[in-house]
Amino acid sequence: VYVEALLDRTPDDVFSAFAAHVHALEDVLECLMVAGGFDYLLKVRVRDMAAYRAFLGDVLAGMPGGRETRAYAVVGEGKRTPTNPV
């Protein structure tokens, strides 16, 4: 599941608290700070949608500084490039 996370405020301490919290979560494989309509993009791996609902209620809802999330469940893969030779 890819999750867009929008923070309620954007001072450095809120970014730092959010990133530190996410860093400790095993289900979060990647956390990218992005520019645009939201602040972070999370790549979350869970067993199934029931596990995601638990993750949403138990973890995402309590993220420090979190205001809003949007989730996109992956249903197929068009391309995967594990490394970039740049």
Image (cartoon, rainbow, N blue to C red):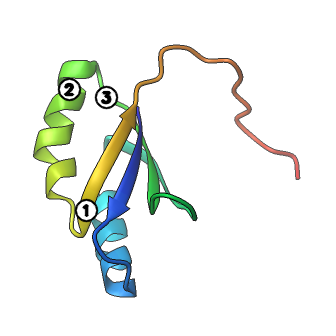
Residue at 37% over, 67% down: 19
Compared to residue 82, the image places residue 42 above or below, namely below
Q: Distance between the residues labelled 3 and 2?
A: 6 Å
Q: Nearer the viewer, residue 1 or 47?
A: 1
Q: How far apart are marks 3 and 1 (CA)?
A: 20 Å
Q: Where is residue 67 in the image (x, y as percent from the top left)?
A: 25, 61
| Residue neighbourhood size for the residue with mark 2, other residues' Cα within 10 Å, grouped as few (<14), some (14–19), many (≥20) | few
The kind of residue on which mark 1 rests is Gly
Q: Nearer the viewer, residue 33 or 51?
A: 33
Q: Which residue lies furthest to the bottom in this view?
A: 12
Q: Check residue 51 in the rendering and tell me which mark sits there, or answer none.
A: 2
Choose the circle earlier in sequence order: 3 or 2: 3
Dot 1: element = strand
The kind of residue on which mark 2 rests is Ala
Q: Position of residue 84 (x, y in %)?
A: 80, 44
Q: Where is residue 22 in the image (x, y as percent from the top left)?
A: 32, 58
Foreground: disc 2 or disc 1 = 1
Q: Is the Cβ of the residue at disc 3 closer than 8 Å to that at disc 2?
A: yes
Q: Quadrant of residue 10?
A: bottom left
Q: Residue furthest front?
A: 37
Q: Label 3 belongs to which residue?
A: 46
Q: How far apart are marks 2 and 1 (CA)?
A: 20 Å
Residue at 88% over, 53% down: 86
Q: Is the Cβ of the residue at disc 2 closer than 8 Å to that at disc 1?
A: no
Q: Which of 30 and 78 is in front in this view?
A: 78
Q: Label 1 belongs to which residue?
A: 66
